[in-house]
Image (cartoon, helix red, strand yellow):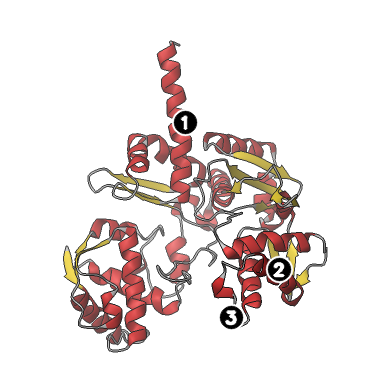
Amino acid sequence: MSNLANQLVIAERADLARGIRLLLGSPLIRAATDPDGFDLVRRRADTLASWFDHHCGWALVVEPRQGYARLAKVRSDPDASRPARRDRGSRAPFDRRRYALFCVAAAELLGGPATTVGLLADRVAQATAADPVLPGFDPALRAERMAFVDVLRALEGFGALEPVDGSTEDYTDSAGAKVLYRVDATLLVRLLAAPNGPSRLPDGDRLAGMLAEPRYGGASATDVQRALRLRHSVLRKLFDDPVVYWADLTAEQREWATSRTGRENMRKAAEQGGFAVEERAEGVLLVDPESLATDGRFPDDGDNAKVAALHLLDSLGASRAGLTADQLREDAESVLDRSPGSARTYRYSDGPARLVADAVAVLVDFGLARRDGERIVALPAAARYTIVSGSPDSAGGNPS
């Protein structure tokens, strides 16, 4: 093989690895907000689509003219650990009301390429009034308008809605605010990552129906289909969770993951994605040296809860039985004392207790601790963040 051919192969491998990690971290990449990332994914679209389909059973759609790439990351076991968040203040998770308004607003936006905030609010009010289950949307109430603004800002963040005249925030203070939007209906449709649309399903357990994947054969699956389902289900966890513990897998998944075939599959996929693999007796995690593949980072000196979480690990690691939130309060107070100029939101209304709660949530989300009744117990992966001379261990890095 010529030197030029070698260089092309090396470049393609590097692009594949970077593209995989970019899409894992941001399943929706738009040319408007990440032109370099979109250009890479566009150039390697076929290779990336083949990789995600083979290893995870995820579909990648790249629309060069519309300027976006969408990876449909279907979860075999969906959970609530990655909620939509409000684009304001402390970025609180969406509540049930906001999720409902998001779905209704998205459906109403499919009606045309442009709308105004007032027209859309009226249509949402009419749609909820006609629904026997949903509470009606009342734009006369400020709390309702705030929830609606959070929904619109989320749609703007996805690129499905673009204000071309006026500011969405104005609607919070006045139902008479004037805001004109451009609607990207094709992107709006792509936001739903489920294999099956809910409107096409019969009444009943629609969530299960949305997640059903015929390629795995269901109850009448062949050996080949069962093997495919096992591979995809384990690799989905590996590439979407901070850490995978063998104890959290089903018996079938654990048998596959710890087999020679499973280990070879995981290591090959990780290598192609540019990850380092850390495997221990309790499980396995991937480390992304560039932190591209994650939508959340730990450690993170810019986040008060994550700073506190890192310090809580020291105390948790020293107690096999775990500690209660009250026992961890002293650690939180110590963090606040060392940072007098920051963490202002935790200095009032029982701030240390709220800091402990937020820090524990961080540790649980990153697979570093679990709740056992009223106690918080450190998990094996927490050992990689042991603090030595004030810093995480040198083997660190951010899990994907």
Whether residue 265 is visible, yes or no, is: yes
| Residue in front for this viewpoint, 163 or 239 | 163
Disc 1 on helix, strand or loop?
Answer: helix
Mark nearer the viewer, 1 or 2 = 2
Q: How many marks?
A: 3
Gap in Å between the C-alphas at discs 3 and 1? 49 Å
Q: Which numbered disc, 3 or 2, marks the residue that appears first in the sequence?
A: 2
At horizontal 37% and vertical 35% (from top left) the residue drawn is 44
Mark nearer the viewer, 3 or 1 = 3
Q: Amino acid at mark 2?
A: Ser
Q: Amino acid at mark 1?
A: Ala
Return the residue at label 1.
Answer: 14
| Corner quadrant of residue 316 | bottom right
Residue extending farthest to the front is 341
Disc 2 on helix, strand or loop?
Answer: helix
Q: Which mark is residue 334?
A: 2
Return the residue at label 3.
Answer: 348
Neighbours of disc 1 within 10 Å: few (<14), some (14-19), many (20+): some
**Residue 398 on image: x %, y %:** 59, 48
Q: Is residue 293 left or right of residue 108?
A: right
Gap in Å between the C-alphas at discs 1 and 2? 44 Å
Query: Mark 3–mark 1 contact, CB under 8 Å?
Result: no
Q: Amino acid at mark 3?
A: Tyr
Gap in Å between the C-alphas at discs 3 and 2? 15 Å
At horizontal 42% and vertical 28% (from top left) the residue drawn is 12
Q: Is residue 127 left or right of residue 344?
A: left
